[in-house]
Amino acid sequence: MLDTVSINTAESLLRQPGAGAVVAGMLYLACLVVAIRLFRRCMPESRQQSYWLIVIIALTSVGIAEGLGLPAQLLQMMRDGTVAQGSYIGRWWMQIEVIMALLAAYITVVIILKPLVPPDRGSAKVFQSLGMLLMFIAIRSVSIHELDLVLRMPVAGQITLNNLFEATFLFFVYWRLRSAQQM
């Protein structure tokens, strides 16, 4: 009886608008809690503490931006701008250029922040997972039309493929954070 009730409750929650955002929000919060614990465990004024502070700031800002729908607003502004300029057909090349710029920025950030990453494997894995999450969000924000159509496909109720990918990347960040916490 209890299993049937919990399954029916879960199914009704998945059908609610914004269900994917709720799942992502909970995962951001879980990641943030573990990152704060890792930050508090470090020696004051250490390189590790600086690293975990950067992770906390990144998770907080991305979580807030996602919660407010800023990437979706950026996407809509890009669409409106290209349609107004009459360059919607040439938009594909502009998106490729933006993606290349994002990749260059990502590589630059990795080069700059790499010295702050503590030498243990867990911290390096967190750095990689967080980088993959941020790149997914950035590329999704540029949103090539065909990719956008695929990402909007529903997977379960109101949860789209986009929500599933973001939750998967967040789960990897959480998993890596938990692994780093156990080291």
Image: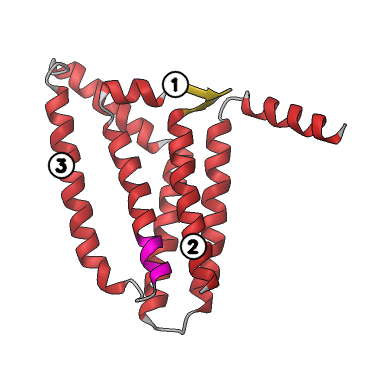
Q: What stretch is highlighted in magenta?
A: 121-127
Residue with the most extreme right position: 1
Residue highlighted by disc 2: 177
Q: What residue type is labelled 3?
A: Met
Q: How crowded is mark 3: few (under 14 residues within 10 Å), some or many (20 or more)?
A: few
Q: In which quarter of the image is residue 146?
A: top left
Q: Where is residue 160 in the image (x, y as percent from the top left)?
A: 48, 27
Q: Where is residue 183 in the image (x, y as percent from the top left)?
A: 51, 74
Q: Which residue is drawn at 45% across and 84% down?
A: 44
How far is disc 1 from disc 3 in space, using C-alphas? 26 Å
Q: Which of 162 and 43 is in front in this view?
A: 162
Mark 1 vs 3, N-terminal side = 3
Q: Which of 85 and 34 is in front in this view?
A: 34
Q: In which quarter of the image is the N terminus?
A: top right
Mark 2 vs 3, N-terminal side = 3
Mark 2 vs 1, N-terminal side = 1
Q: How crowded is mark 1: few (under 14 residues within 10 Å), some or many (20 or more)?
A: some
